[in-house]
Amino acid sequence: MTDISPAFLKKIIQYWNLENILSISRTPEGNVNTNWIIETEEQKYILKELNEGTIEKLEFEFDYLQYLRSKAFPYHIPNPLPTTTGMYYLQEQGRYYWLYNYINGKTTITIGETELQEIAKMVSTYHSLLEQSPYCFGIPKVEKYNPWIEEELFGFIHELGTIEEFNDEDRILQKHGSILLDIAQDLSNRTAKRLKTYALHRDLGGDNLIWHHTKLIGVLDFENVGVYQEPFIKDLAVILLYSCRNDENASQIDLEKAMVLLEEYTSTRTLEREEYVKLPNFLIHGKIE
């Protein structure tokens, strides 16, 4: 993203007719969107600039959010606000912008047993709502599950033959590369055909969750929903990797935390046997990703 002048930002904001602006501050840059917090005398807003993707994917994201609201998803999610022309996004100088009300709460908290149960309840509810949609949200079903991982692994393994001196990562890849490649190929060619796939959030953790004390109240950043169609255990694998880390070794999963998450999730939504069987492969695949 190129730098944007304060004058250009103010021009953009005028399309939403915001009054009595007190401050505009840019948040840490994301991969898909760049965000600004706009504070007025009455309330705060988030202005987003689309860095990657297409307008079709942005419109798909808006439809997706509207679907969740129509099904009474019991958590705050971004709600695009119309411009003065009635559109829900603005195109200016080849860039796309949209605005929603700021969701109050904390994004950085310590994840303990209570918080893991809260996350599991939310994900179970979210997945159950996705199952109710017969349309799979209209995105074309991809033939491969995140195919760039398989392609890059193959390239890295091929490059090992040209390296004279190995480092630790090279030695690990030399020893386990063929296994990792088999896992990637299994998920893209076989598992993807057996398990039902959906347009998923893919990053239900960290700064994307909004908390009030120990209660989960909101979910942010749905920009990945139009990228791939994947099984529900993709979402669970990401949560296990990043919210169930071992306190002493962050590269390992704490099995007790993992059990808390999975037991709460399966108390309201059953996992298929094939999902249990393939979960370790999705964890490994997620770690590579």
Image (cartoon, rainbow, N blue to C red):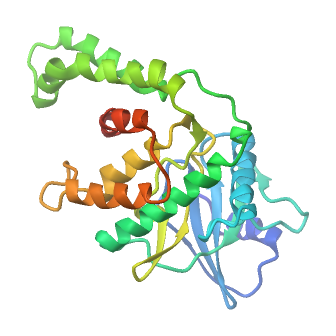
Decide which of 174, 64 is in the foreground and name it: 64
Q: Is residue 132 above or below residue 206?
A: above
Where residue 156 sits in the image (x, y, percent)? 28, 19
Q: Is residue 221 visible to the viewer in this orientation of the structure?
A: no
Where residue 104 sits in the image (x, y, percent)? 55, 80
Residue drawn at the location 68% of the way across and 29% of the way down: 140
Where residue 181 sits in the image (x, y, percent)? 31, 19
Residue drawn at the location 18% of the way across and 22% of the way down: 176
Residue extending farthest to the bottom is 41
Give the total number of marks visible in the rendering: 0
Is 182 on the left-hand or right-hand side of 216? left
Residue extending farthest to the top is 161
Q: Is residue 157 visible to the viewer in this orientation of the structure?
A: yes
Q: Is residue 2 above or below residue 38?
A: above
Find residue 39 and report its image quarter: bottom right
Decide which of 212, 45 is in the foreground and name it: 212
Where residue 198 sits in the image (x, y, percent)? 60, 40
Is 181 on the left-hand or right-hand side of 97? left
Find residue 97 and report its image quarter: bottom right
Decide which of 144, 81 is in the foreground and name it: 144
